[in-house]
Amino acid sequence: MVTNSISTDPAAIPEAKASRGFAGWVILGVAVLCVQIYTYAAWVMSPDFRPTPPGSDPMPAIAHVSIAGYELFSMLILIPVVVWFVYGVAKTGKIDITRALMVGWLSAYWLDPYLNVLRPMFTYNASAVNFGSWASHIPFWHSAGGARIAEPLLIIAPSYFYTFSTTALIAVWVMNRAEMLRPGLKWAGLLLAGFIGVWFTMELLDIVATRYMGLDAWPGSVQSLSLWGGAFYQFPIYELIFFPSPFVACAFLIRSADARGDTAIERGISAMAGPQWRRNMFRIFAFVAFCNVCNFAYTGGMALTSLAANPWPAGVPSWLADGQCGAFTGLPCKP
C-alpha cells in the first residue's frame, strides 16, 4: 500500500482554505455513520441477529474447504494490516489517503446487502460464519427475506477494510503506467486502464468465488446476460461494469491529490487551523461519505437490474438460498 506522501517544500505551497464542498462531504459522512450505527444496533437487538443455517442440501467438499480456508486467510491477513494501520497513525499522527480510504470502505460495508433491496438477487454461502443480515433494518428496505442473507463476517468485512482499498490502488497503478506509456492520455483512456486493473484482479477473484468456490451466487440475474446463465452459479456479465466503477472512482480521487496531499473532496484540509486529530477526523468523515456514495451507486444500480431478472434457476442449493425465497421458504423469488 502507499501513503501518497508528496515531498514538496511547504513554504512553496500557497495557502488554501477548506472548500464548501469539503464541508458538505463531512456533513454527509456524519449522517451516513449515524444511519449505519442505527441499522447495526437495531439488527443486534432484534430476533434477526442469528445465524442463517445452510440447510439440508449436501455441499461439495471443495466449497467446505474453500470457505474455511478463505475465512482463515482473511483473518491472518487482517492482523498485519491492522498493525500496519495503527503503527503508521501512531508514528505520524496523521491519517493519510490510503488509511482514510480503508476506513471509508469499511464504513460502506453496511450497504453490502443492498443489492437485494428490491428483489432477492444475490446470496452468500450460509456455511460461513454469519449472523444473518441487518438488511431489513436498513431504512426503506423493500425486499422480503433480507434478514436471512448470510453475510460471511470473517470474509467480507475484512475485504471492505483492506481488499477494496488495495483494488483502488491497483487501479491507480495501472492508470499511472498507462500514462507513462501514452503521455497525454485523456480521461477516457485512464478510465479504461482503471477498469482493466480491476478486471484482472478483483473481478477475476469474484468470478472464481462464484463459479468454483461456492462463496456466493447471483440467482436473480438476467440469464441471457450472464456467464453460465440458467445455472445456480451464473455470473452477470454487467457486473463487469458495475463492480469496478467505485474503485475506478476512488482511483481518480487519489490521483486528484494536490501538492499538500489533499484530494478533491477535502481540498484545503491541510491548511485548516487546529489540532491534527481534528483534521484526521474531518478527513475520515469525507472519505466515509465518498465511499458510501460509491457503494450505494454500485449496489443500487445492480438492484435495479433485478427488476428485469429471470426467475431464480432451478436447483439453487439450500446453502446458497439463504432462506430468502424459493422452495425452502414458500416465498416467490420473483413476483
Image: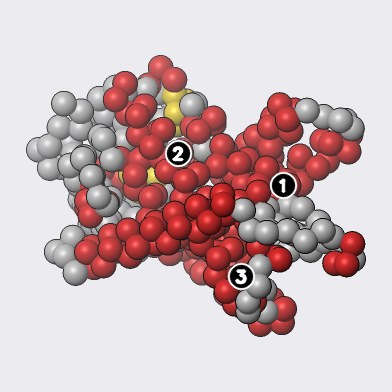
Foreground label between 3 and 1:
3
Q: CA distance from mark 3 to mark 1?
A: 19 Å
Q: Residues within 10 Å of mark 2 (few under 14, many from 20)?
A: some
Q: Is residue 95 left or right of residue 210?
A: right
User: What residue is shown at x 27% (from left), y 52% (from top)?
Assistant: 138
Quadrant hosting residue 194: top right
Q: Nearer the viewer, residue 48 or 294?
A: 294
Residue 143 appearing in the image: yes
Where residue 8 appears, x then y in whole percent? 88, 62
Q: Secondary structure at mark 1?
A: loop
Q: CA distance from mark 2 to mark 3?
A: 27 Å
Q: Is residue 128 left or right of residue 187?
A: left
Residue with the most extreme top position: 224
Q: Secondary structure at mark 2?
A: helix
* Badge 2 amino acid: Ala
Q: Nearer the viewer, residue 1 or 28?
A: 28
* Badge 1 amino acid: Ser
Name the N-terminal-most of marks 2 and 1. 1
Q: Which residue in the protein does label 1 denote?
A: 256
Q: Secondary structure at mark 3?
A: helix
Q: Which residue in the protein does label 3 denote?
A: 279
Residue 83 appearing in the image: no
